[in-house]
Image (cartoon, rainbow, N blue to C red):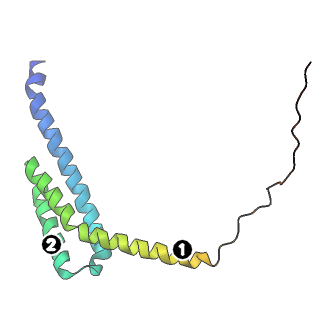
Amino acid sequence: MKDAEANAAEDKKQLEIVTSRNQLDSLVHSVRKSLKDYGDKIGADEKSKIETALKDAEEAMKSDDKAKIDASTQALGQAAQKLGEKMYAEAQQKQGAAGAGDAGASKPADDGNVVDAEFTEVKDRKS
């Protein structure tokens, strides 16, 4: 029991490090995939910044320094922001083009199940 209490703070610290490392690992994976798919759509300067941030992030993941890991996560996120903007803009253009193409071909909704009827209100008279 005393060992558990004595090690609780260390266990909590390790859990925080592992959680931060996992978040950074996920971001690295995501940025690498995005860079592979959309890297040709950004400038060489931006691409270089992202690649440098990726290398720094991989080094940070090897350490047990939570502050360094968190700083690398933030730096990589900021470096990859332009890439995300390009991806978003391209997705919007595709969606806009698809919407414009569908506008002329859209057909009215099927009104076959709609029934138009007249009604008369009947009041019950109870004496």
Percent position (x, y) of residue 70?
Answer: 14, 52
The quarter of the picture where the C terminus appears is top right
25 versus 122 height, above or below: below
On screen, residue 2 versus residue 22, left or right, reads left
Which residue is painted at 15% across and 34% down in the image? Answer: 12
Which residue is painted at 18% across and 67% down in the image? Answer: 79
Q: Which residue is the site of mark 2?
A: 49
Location of residue 8 by image quarter: top left
Number of the label disc, if any, that sits on residue 41: none
On screen, residue 113 versus residue 59, left or right, reads right
Q: Give the amino acid at mark 1.
A: Gly
Within 10 Å of disc 2 (Cα), the crowding (few <14, some 14-19, many 20+) is some
Earlier residue among tags 1 and 2: 2
Percent position (x, y) of residue 124?
Answer: 89, 28
Location of residue 85 by image quarter: bottom left
Percent position (x, y) of residue 104?
Answer: 63, 79
Element class at badge 1: helix
